[in-house]
Image (spheres, grey):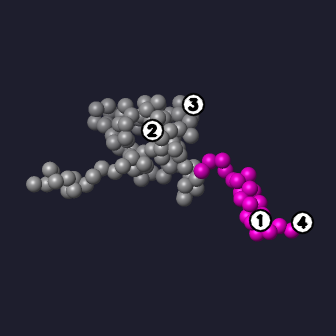
């Protein structure tokens, strides 16, 4: 059976969809999360209590660290949450799924960055 070019393209697309991962990935190959679901998971799992609703950190409760725009790669972020032995207790997959952590990471990376104080006229007389 001979296939024309468009049939070959469709067949290749079907094979890649069938064989490919069901999870979208970012440029580094890490699973790509959903920022909207991540915000909901951050609230659901209580992360906001120490880290704020936008990952901005807090001085109120044990000095929750700033998480927004973390420089940690996604895999390192998940590993830290799972195995920390610092002020934050570790969270097993029974408490927070990998999927939720991937979504939380996506949300934290999507939070708009704060304005540069020099760009705020009221702060610069």
Q: Nearer the viewer, mark 3 or mark 2?
A: 2
- Name the residue nearer the viewer: 93 or 119: 119
- Mark 1 and mark 4: Cα distance apart in space: 12 Å
| Residue 26 occupies quadrant | bottom right
Which is more N-terminal, label 3 or label 1? 1
Q: Quadrant of residue 55?
A: top left
Q: Nearer the viewer, mark 4 or mark 2?
A: 4
Q: Tell me the element at label 1.
A: helix
Labels 1 and 3 touching (C-beta < 8 A): no
User: Of helix, strand and loop, which mostly describes the magenta segment?
Assistant: helix
Residue for point 48% across, 46% down: 106
Residue 77 is at least partly visible in this image: no
Quarter of the image that includes the N terminus: bottom right
Marks counted in the figure total: 4
Residue 56 visible? The answer is: yes
Q: Is residue 117 left or right of residue 93?
A: left
| Residue 62 position within the rendered picture, expressed as x and y whole percent measured from the top left | 32, 33
Q: Secondary structure at mark 4?
A: loop
Part of the protein shown in magenta: 2-24
Q: Residue 33 location in percent, x, y?
A: 53, 46
Camera-side residue of 62 and 14: 14
Q: Which residue is mark 3?
A: 94
Crowding near pointer 4: few (<14 within 10 Å), some, many (20+)?
A: few
Say whether disc 2 or disc 1 marks the residue closer to the N-terminus. 1
Mark 3 closeness class: few <14, some 14–19, many ≥20 residues within 10 Å: few
Q: Secondary structure at mark 2?
A: helix
Q: Quadrant of residue 4?
A: bottom right
Task: Provide the secondary structure element on which disc 3 rests.
Answer: loop
Give the number of the disc on residue 8: 1
Q: Which residue is mark 4?
A: 1
């Amino acid at each position: 059976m001979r296939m024309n070019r468009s049939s070959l393209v469709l067949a290749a697309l079907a094979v890649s969809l069938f064989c490919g991962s069901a999870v979208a990935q970012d440029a580094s190959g890490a699973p790509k999360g959903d920022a909207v679901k991540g915000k909901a998971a951050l609230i659901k799992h209580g992360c906001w209590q120490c880290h704020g609703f936008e990952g901005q950190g807090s001085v109120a409760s044990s000095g929750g660290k700033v998480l927004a725009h973390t420089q940690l790669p996604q895999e390192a972020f998940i590993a830290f949450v799972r195995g920390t032995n610092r002020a934050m207790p570790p969270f097993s997959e029974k408490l927070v799924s990998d999927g939720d952590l991937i979504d939380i990471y996506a949300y934290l990376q999507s939070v708009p960055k704060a304005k540069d104080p020099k760009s705020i006229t009221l702060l610069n007389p």
